[in-house]
Each structure stands twice: as structure tokens, then as C-alpha cells.
Image (cartoon, coloured by chain):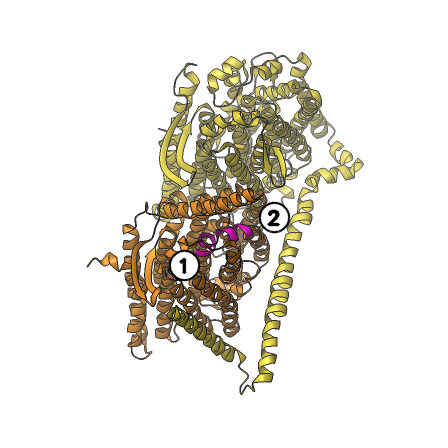
Chain colours: A yellow, B orange
Amino acid sequence: MIQAIVFFPLIGALVAGLLGRIIGHRTSEYLTTGLLIVSALLAWVVFSGYWFAPAEAEASVTKVEILRWVTSGPLELNWILRVDTLTAVMLVVVTTVSSLVHVYSIGYMADDPYRARFFAYLSLFTFAMLMLVTADNFLQMFFGWEGVGLMSYLLIGFWYTRPSANAAAIKAFVVNRVGDFGFALGIFAAFMVLGHLGFDDAFAAVAGQAGKTMHFLSWDFDAMTVVCLLLFMGAMGKSAQFLLHTWLPDAMEGPTPVSALIHAATMVTAGVFMVARLSPMFDASPFAMSVVFTVGAITAFFAATVGLVQNDIKRVIAYSTCSQLGYMFVALGAGVYSAGIFHLFTHAFFKALLFLGAGSVIHAMHHEQDMRNMGGLAKKIPRTYWMMLIGTLALTGVGIPGTPLGFAGFFSKDAIIETAYAVGGNLGTFGFWALVIAAMFTSFYSWRLIHLTFHGEARWGHAHAPADAHDHSSHAEPDTDHGHSHEPHESPNVMLVPLYVLAAGAVLAGVVWHENFFGHAEEITEFFKGAVTVSTERMEAAHAVPVLVSWSATIAMLIGFGAAWYMYMVDKAAPARLAAANPGLYKFLLNKWYFDELYDLIFVRPANYLGTALWKGFDDWLVDQTIVEGLGHRVRDVTNRVVKLQSGYLYHYAFVMLIGIALLLTWVIVSAGLLG
Amino acid sequence: MNIFDNILTLVTFLPLLGAAILLFVPANDDAGKDLARWIALLTSVVTLILSLWMWARFDNSNAGFQFVENYEWIGSSIGYRMGVDGVSVLFVVLTALLLPACVLASWTSIQNRVREYMLVFLVLETMCIGVFTTLDLAMFYVFFEGSLIPMFLIIGIWGGARRIQAAYKFFFYSFTGTVLMLLAIMAMYWQAGTLDIRKLLAFHFDPSVQFWLWIGFFASFAVKMPMWPFHRWLPEAHVEAPTAGSVILAAILLKLGGYGFIRFSLAMFPDASLQFAPFVFTLSVAAIILTSLVALVQTDMKKLIAYSSVAHMGFVTMGIFSGNVMAVHGAVFQMISHGIVSAALFLCVGVVYDRMHTREISAYGGLVEPMPRYAVAFMVFTMANVGLPGTSGFIGEFLTMIGTFQVNTWVVFFSAFGVILSAAYALWLYRRIIFGALTKESLKGILDLNLREVAVLAPLVILTILFGFYPAPILDATAASVNLIAENFSKAIGDTAALVAAAN
């Protein structure tokens, strides 16, 4: 069964990719989508098995060996599909969102001339992601890791005629590679310290490493801290955490279904999955855990601040994703892995919903993405509006604390905020406040998005300048030739049905699975069956927080909602006034804290400058002209003096001379052999 | 008589026989040209089949030399000795595999002196295979040196505008290196009294002698490899060489250096290898980082790929001198993989060069539309060049790095920057050639891969992906010999360490 889940998408991708032009677009779409739906149904079957299985059930880990991979000396790595509760959760998330995105894309990409290729990419991405979550050793995880990176690169750059899409694609790949730099070193270090790259063997070896140091570079560090921090660097790249986040907003250049699948629900959560999968290792390094916690908290706060002022509808959601990933890492850093996975699970539903909803808005607006040119759409596209509203309620975490009433995000976000508070000390206080403020900002920018897009007066129609910041000439972009009607139109059912399904998830995912992910330690253990570590102590602490802490997220949410209501519905001049009053701060946020400019200045330009200098200065000038040719000139000067050359073709003479030397020396050695 | 008694002689000299037959092909009219091409293709394909047959009969569990032929020639010191072990056998297959590709790639692009061209290529094949199959140091030297001359002619006669200078530079560098190697070979003879490689492998050279011998061999192999900063000849030679010349240069000739490092430097001079390891590591890291940076700013497709070759060879030298099983295994794998991938990349450049007659990156853009098949093949090889898991490029990099990490973390820390930089330059190249809008008038009528080009590239695409997912055929064939080499190395340096400890 697990083979079918993993390999059906691959089969679909290969057929659509290689035979797409023969079998046609329609067949390719139906084939890949059909296979993924089957894959998703099977994934739910597997998941149910783990959900309902009795606590003491044997064989909670299933492994299916596929093929030998790398065998060298002490290394023995195979392709293995490993399923446990953690994997089952991921299987459900990946295949469900992916199959819905496939269905949605049939409508969204209907006019694209390269649809078969698009569906092949989507399916291949899904395959790589499934290989990642079913990995049984570090190397296979790295395979999936890089595989999803490649597909992300190809899908961001899908509209390859746009320079901005190409630039974003390369940026995504290269920034991820910076993270992979750490991941790769982490794998090497893990092998050196633990002696194994298979997860089970490696985890078993962790116990013996407590307090041991390893010699890394020129210093001795705590072994597990080095390993975990290096690995975490990979997670930071993939999950767009602070400092390595710059690629994610740019990745919005890809088609919107891609953003929903890759840059919201699945690939970007790979970092979270990785840390959870390696929970026994991270547990062994309190320092690494506090780094994870801190980075998560900073990201949650930072991305939320930037999200406040963005005008592109997709970028707002992208920063929101970045921020929510920060929440997940806070939970992991606090050692309550199940809470992080819980948020990953619920977030997948409501964030994919928001992205696909935004896609529906963009579709309706004929590829307008600037919210300043929207407004009043609620009446034009009511179904999309309601779905976006559900997504927003889930994202902002609407619910009543202390009762099982609330949207999905309410349960998982509150769980994380309580967890952060329970960490205590300076770290816990910092994390708690960062998250609560971020929750307030989240609520603000989410409602700002809703108000700007759906409420108020319509700002489209007259002000729709054709050349306005987007490329109408690109043939690859679907739906540009819809004639002259700029009247927004509701999307077809094939795009709306996936929204309904995701909306159901956004409403119910929290209520239904709350106890499994964030109940009492026993319940969680019973559910995960050892797939992640569960600390009873931390769980109890997280449940024992003051009432005010439980309410904090809800209060923050209400403040954000109120502020957004006031600034965008009541006093509409307020945002402009506020920006004018704090021009520095506004610019700072609008330009995303100037990270792109900074990196360009300290990395990109020096690399190019150094490359040129090494090439022109070292290779061409020093080695080539000065040393080698200089040597040649000296030789020529000497030969000129000694022999009168009759024609000036130095090279021929030199060549003959060298051949002569070769022959002579060959003769010498042969005769030496004779003498011996 | 069993054919396998002489299989290596057959594989090595069959191309030379084909070359001899070519001498009798008459004038250079069209029929003669075609005949020359077909003879060359037939010869190289038969050689390939023989080499594959040999590989099929190769015993993976045997760490020693197989298919050995041994005839005394000059006393017991110099002889006609052939044999392959796990380290060399695959290079024979690789050479035989790429020759048909070279002949096919030159099918229409070479119109000038076709007979001589094919003749020179077949001679080159014999020289290259000979380097890997011979078990006599004197013959090794002859083959090693002999490979220079055909390559010199290929660049000098069929090359681009600055071919004479490039050919001269290629020769000058390589030759200077080999002179020192020759001195070392003579010194080895005086020490050991034989040039039989098997006996030399068993002979223990005094560490103080090893020092000088190591330097002698290093001079030759480091230039061949090429290691930074002896690499300057390579970009120039690549740029001027015809496509097939670049293929052999990158895929095979560079590997002569790596093979030599393993066979001689590491296996015969372990103490010196250990002593020089930090030096080699430094140069390897410099190659990986500095030449990657240089590759980043290139404007010529071939130069960019040539510089990336230097960077990839940095992983090989790093792995070899780490001396443990994983690292050496990775180095061998990386060489085979790079042989396939770099050959394919140069073939890809040749495809568009044949159509547009320029290698300037800026002359291209948007090729994905008129050339979808080409775009797919180029993507696969670009990703292999980047070292993406699932392509053969990954396995070698991974093994060399994880092996070296056990020895020296600084080296791996720096070499891992290559992971970032290779992605940057390779994708930047791909984006400028394949992606973007098709706006250049000159490119509008460009045609996708024809059947001949597909026949050349498709097997390489398949091998690149196959060895990424299932590298066992290569790893298994090399495992026993690599284990033996690594074991001997650790024993030798262990002895040294013990001596030092005893002395203290």
C-alpha cells in the first residue's frame, strides 16, 4: 500500500512528462490527478490505521525496502519506505493537499499551453515530498529534500519567459542550498558521532553521546549540539526561517496552486518535519533546542511585521506562512514536538485554503494581485469570499478558550503559545511575547487582506491600467485574453470544490485531533507510538499555564481585528496617516527589513567581484601572462641568442624540441633497463 | 585459447588496428569521408562491446589484478604486462563508451581531413585505455605521454581561432609535469630494480625517498587533473578544442591524473601522501571555491564548464588523499560520474555550437521553446553537475565529503561551499541559455535534437540517473580494490605512527 502511495505520483509524472505531447493535456491532467486522489485515499487509510490502533499495537513502524543504494565501507544505505505515525500524518497532509491542488489546477491552468508539463511537475514534486517523509535514513531524507527543492525551482520558474520568475527560481534554489550546506555537514557529523545514518540505529546511539565532545573545525564542542545545529541550518533554509527566509516571498512568482502546495502546506514544512523526526537527537542538546526556539520566535515576529504593509495579496499570505512556520519551530524548540506537528497539520489546511482562495481572487481579477486595485469583491465572488473568510478565521485562531469550540488554527496556535510560556525564564518570556504580538499582527494583516479585497468600494474597473506591473504580453500566462470584460467572475466548480474540502479541514482539523496532538502526555504517546519523543513534564507544564495565558492569543486576535476594522473600514485615511507619521518604519517594513539589499551587498556582489578578480587577475594576468608566458619569452630570448631562427614560428620549433626530449628520455630509460 | 587471456590487449589495441585500416582509406572525397566515419564508429563500438564483456566477466570480489598478461621484454625489469583491478576497470569501459559518442558528435561537424581526424581519435583511444590497462611503469609512461600527441593534434588542427596557442599551452604544461615524473620513474627503478607495477606496489620505499618520488609524480598528475593553480591550460584547451576533443579531454584525460594519484601516489608512497595531505587539501579547497567563483562570471559556455570541471576534480583529490574507504571510493565514483556528466555537458554545448557557431552565453536564451528535448537533457546534466541526489553527481561528492570529514573537518567545511556555488553557476548558465523569452532573431529557426544527437545523449541521460539511484554496479566493482588500497594505506601510516610513538 505504501508503495502505491509513493509511486503513483511518480508514474503519473513520468507519463505526463514524457508522453504529455502524445496523450494530450486533458489525459495528462486526468491521469495525474486521478492517481493522486487514489494515493490520498490510501494515505487516509494508512493514517486511520495509526489513529485507531490500540496503544500497545505491535509494529508501529512499517518498513518496506525498495532497492540498495550506497554501499561503501561502513556505510550501507538502502531505499526504504518507513511509515510511523509522524509519517502517516505527513502522508495525509501531502497527498490531500496535493490532490486538491491538482484538481484546482485543472481549472486554474486551463488556458496554459504547457499544462501537461505543469501536472508532471506537480506530481513529481509530490513524489519527492513523499520520499522525504518516508525516509528511513538521513541520505534518503536529503534526496527528498533536494528533490522538492528542484521541483520548487522548476515550478517557481514555470512561466520561464518572465525574468522575475527565473530570478526567483534561482534564488529559491541557491538560498536553500545555503541551508543544505549545513544539512550536509550535519549528516557527516552525525555519521562521525553516532556511527550510523539509519534513523533507528542513530537514535539508539544518541544515549551514549551525552556530554561527549567532538572536534569540529579547530575546537571541541558538545557533540550533539554541533550535529543538531548543523542539521537545523538545513531546516532553516527549507522552512524559510529568519536569515534564510528571503526566497519565500519571491517564490510567489510561481503559479498560485504551486504556492498553495509547495510554499504553504508541504515543502516549507519539511524543516519542521525534520526536527520532529530527529526529536531524540534534539532532545540531547538543550542548547540546540533553545536556538530552534529563538529562531522560531524571531521569525514569527519578523515575518508578521513585514506582512502588515505588503500590498500583493500573495505576498501577505507568504509572510504569514513564514510567520506560522516560526510558531511551529517554537513548539519544537520547547520540546513539545507534537504541538509543532499539530500546527503543521492544521496550517496545511487553512493556508492552502487561503492560497487557493487568493488564486481564485486573482483568477477573477484577471491576474491582478495588487490589493490596492481590488475591493468590494464579496458580492462578485461570494463563494470565494466565504471560503477566504473561513481560512482567515482559522488562521487568526478564532475560538473560545477552555471549550472545544474553535477553528483549526485556534487549537494549534494556542497550544504553541501555552507551550512557549511554559518554557519559562527569559527565553520563555521572550518567546511568549513574540508569539502573542505576532498573533495580533496576524489578525491585523489577515483582516486587512479581507477588507482590502472583499469589502469597501470597488477600486478595479476604471483604474485597471494595462501595463500595471504585470506582464500581459506573456503568452504562457493563462487567461489573459478573456476579451475586454474586466468584470470579476466567480471561478468554476473545479476550483471551488477543493476550497470546500480544505475549508472543512480548516474548521474541523483542530477539534477532531486536538487530544491526539496536544492532550495529555499519555494520549499523545498513544497516538505517536514513539515516532516523536513526548515529555510528560513539559506537557503538564504547558497545560498548567495561567488562564490569562490561555486567553492571550484570543485577546491579541481581537485587538488585531479591531485595529484592522478601524483602519480599513471606519477611518480609511488612517493607514496613510500612520505611514506618513513613521516614514522610516514604514519603509523598513515595506522593504522587508532590507534583507535583499543587504545580502546583495555582502554576498552576491563580492562573489561576482571575486570571481572576476580571480579570473582576470589571477588566472589570466598572473599565471598566464606573467608567469607562463614570461617563462616562454625568456626561453625565446635565450634561443634567439643561441640559434638564429630562420622563420619566427616559435611554437613549431618548441614542439619539435619537446618531442625530441621525450624521445631522448624514453631512450634513456629503455637503455637503463637494458643495463639493469 | 581463451579470448579472456588476451582481452586487455584486444581492448587496448583494437582502436589502433582501426587506425591502421584508416590509413588505407583513399582520398578525402565524400565517399572516403563516410567510409572513414563508419570504420571509426565500427571500431569504437566493437571496442565498447569487448570492454563491456570484460566488465561482465570481472570478478568483483577479487581485489587484485585480473585478466593479467605478463611477458618479459627487457630482462625482468620491463615487460609487456596488462591487468585491471577495481580502480582501473571502469575507466577502460568509460573510455570505450565515450569514443562512439565522440565519433557520432563529429559526424557532420568535422568536414576537414576526416580520415586523419578519425585516425587520431582511435590512436588517442588506445593511448588512454593503455594507461589504465598496463601494469608496467615504462609502458605507463609511454601511454601517458603518448596521449598528449593526439590531443595536441586535435586541438592544433581541428580547433578554433586560437588553437595553436592553446595546443602549445596544453603541451607545455603537461610535458613539464611529465618530465619530473620520468625522473621519479627512473629513481624508482634504481630503488626497486623493476618497473612491474605489482612488484612496486609491494615494495616499501623509504619515507625520505618517497618524499621526492611523490613530488615527481605530483607534478605530472596535478597538471593533468588539473589542480589549482596548475589549471590555466584547461579552459583554453577546452575553448579551442572541437566538441569531441573537449569530451575526451574532460572525461578521460583529466582522469589519468586521478588514476595516477590512486595507483602511484597513494598506494606506493603512503607516508609521503600522509605528509602532503594538508597541502593537497589546501589546493583542493582552493579549486572548489576559487574556480567556482571564476565559473560564476564566465561568458563563454565551454569556459564555464571547464572551470566547473576543475572544481569537481577538487573533490576527487580531496577524497583520494583522505585515504579512507569512503573517500577513495567516492573519488573513483566521482571520476566516473564526472566522465559521463562533463562529456555530456560538452556534447550539449556542441549541439548548439554546431547550429549557431558561437559559444557566447549571451547569444542564446529561450531555447526551451524550440528545443524541448535538448532542454530536458541539459537539465539532467546541469543537475548532475550541481550534485543533486538522484543523479550520479551526488554519490561521488557525498562519499568524498563524508569520508574526508572523518579526517579533517575544515576541509569539508570549505568544500561544502562548492555545494552552494555549483548551484549558482550551473543554474545561472541554464537560465541564460534555456529559459527566458525567445527574442533573438537568429535563434528562431533553431532545430531540436536530431536522431543522431539523441542517440548520443540518451544513453548518457539514462546512465546519469541510473547511477544516481542505483550506483551499485560502480561501487561494487570498485569496492574490493578500494578496500585493499585503503587498508594498505592505513596500515602504512599506522606503522609510521607506531614508529614515531616508539621513538618518543
Q: Residue A555, relative to residue B174: is it above or below?
A: above
The nearer-to-camera label among 2 and 1 is 1
Q: Which residue is drawn at 55% across and 23% down?
A: A337
Rendered location of residue A255, percent (x, y): 52, 41
Part of the protein shown in magenta = B264-275
Q: Which residue is drawn at 65% across and 14% down?
A: A545
Residue B448, which numbered label?
1
Which secondary structure dominates the residues rendered in magenta?
helix
Q: In this view, does A289 lie to the left or right of A480?
A: right
**Which quadrant of the rendered structure holds the N terminus of chain A?**
top left
Rendered location of residue B265, percent (x, y): 47, 55
Residue linked to disc 2: A466
Q: In this view, does A154 lie to the left or right of A374?
A: left
Label 2 Cα crowd, 10 Å radius (few <14 / some 14-19 / many 20+): few
Q: For numbered disc 2, what is the local secondary structure?
A: loop
Instruction: Give the chain of mark 2.
Output: A
Instruction: Give the chain of mark 1.
Output: B
Q: For numbered disc 1, what is the local secondary structure?
A: loop
Say which of B490 and A163 sits in front. Answer: B490
Say which of B325 and B338 sits in front. Answer: B325
